[in-house]
Amino acid sequence: MVIQWASCGIRLAPFLLAGLCASVALTPSYGGDRLEQIRERGTLIWGADQEGGGPFVYPSEDDPTQLVGFEVELAELIAQHLAVTPRFEQGQWDKLPELLDRGDVDIVLNGYEWSPVRAQRYGTSIPYYIYELQLLGRKDDTSLTSFEDLLV
């Protein structure tokens, strides 16, 4: 799977990369020039929880030791931009900020929603995945005609 940014009609890659790189460099919990440390080390350590599954981060069906998904590709793209190698670090979803605080990971790519509290504590990028919840029902089921019918 390869992200084709231009084919989507969206040219977010430069802005996303700039935002994420700035997030790494400016996150207060790091101190110093973290971006330079990443470049010197030659590795971008990114944290996520693969338990969330596709399309984010999940084991390949062909080789379960390999991870695939668009967050894997995003980490590869960021690492390529920084001229370093990406390295995945598994973390429990609700504990990922702790990995970031301890310096166990350089960035978290794992569907965290923006909030004022997080924005004060961490550098954030523009959203790279936006979704809306939907309800599905059988097309031929006439018993549900409004949202209120679900509140019974």
Image: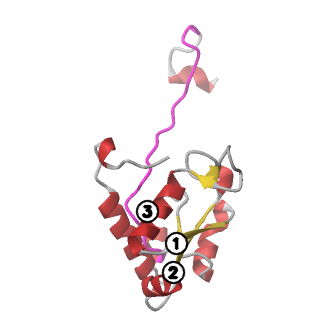
Crowd class of label 3 (few under 14; some 14 to 19; many from 20; radius 10 Å): some
Q: Position of residue 129 (x, y in %)?
A: 44, 50
Label 3, label 1: how far apart the Cα atoms are: 10 Å
Residue at which label 3 appears: 77
32 to 84, vertically: above or below: below
**Residue 111 in sight in this render:** no
- Image: magenta residue range: 121-142
What's the amino acid at mark 2? Gly
Q: Position of residue 26 (x, y in %)?
A: 41, 81
What's the amino acid at mark 3? Leu
Q: Total label count?
A: 3
Between discs 1 and 2, the one toward the N terminus: 2
Label 1, label 2: how far apart the Cα atoms are: 6 Å
Q: Look at the numbered discs 3 and 2 and tell me whether their residues touch, using CB distance below 8 Å.
A: no
Magenta segment, prevailing SS (helix, strand or loop): loop
Q: Quadrant of residue 110?
A: bottom right
Disc 3 on helix, strand or loop?
A: helix
Image point (65%, 60%), residue name: 93
What's the amino acid at mark 1? Thr
Residue 85, numbered label: 1
Between discs 3 and 2, the one toward the N terminus: 2
125 to 5, vertically: above or below: below
Image point (43%, 87%), residue name: 36
